[in-house]
Amino acid sequence: MEKKLPLPPFNAETAKLKVQLAEDAWNSKDPVKISMAYSIDTEWRNRNQFINGRQEVQEFLKDKWQKELEYKLKKELWAFLDNKIAVRFEYEYKNAQGQWFRAYGNENWEFDENGLMQKRYASINDLEIKESERKL
């Protein structure tokens, strides 16, 4: 059986590590690598999209980074309990026309006993910014 350390139940140290590992993986922009942190039957809500299973996660991420260029993400632990973690995040990217954006929001994560994320619910807002306003 696949395992993705650290495993729940989380404490402050392991929850922070799980968040950092997620940030590092997403900044790699490697859809296959990222998808391996999720259960085979993972369920996502990402803005107004519903994504089910690793294959759909991979397709979603591949499409994402074809549109969101020069992507850079920062995640921060918000709260944790047992097998759940809440994060706040922001990321910056530009579109094909060169317009920069900062996206920010919250995610709620739920993990199975093997440390694989089985649920990910993300609320995300995008804000147009000037290149000179970038923080990341």
Image (spheres, helix red, strand yellow):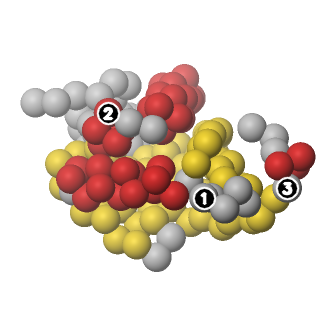
Q: Which residue is mark 2?
A: 33
78 or 38: nearer the viewer: 38
Residue 101 location (% of width, % of height): 72, 58
Q: Which residue is mark 1?
A: 96
Q: Is residue 129 above or below residue 69?
A: below
Name the side, left or right, on which 94 lies relative to 35: right
C-alpha distance separating marks 1 and 2: 25 Å
Residue drawn at 23 percent across, 50 percent down: 54
The amino acid pointed to by label 3 is Lys
Q: Are marks 1 and 2 in contact (CB under 8 Å)?
A: no
Q: Which residue is mark 3?
A: 130
Q: Give the crowd class for mark 3: few <14, some 14-19, many >=20 residues within 10 Å.
A: few
Residue drawn at 22 percent across, 28 percent down: 3
The amino acid pointed to by label 2 is Lys
Q: Can you tell which of label 3 and label 1 is closer to the viewer?
A: 1
Residue 13 visible somewhere in the drawing: yes
Residue drawn at 85 percent across, 55 percent down: 130
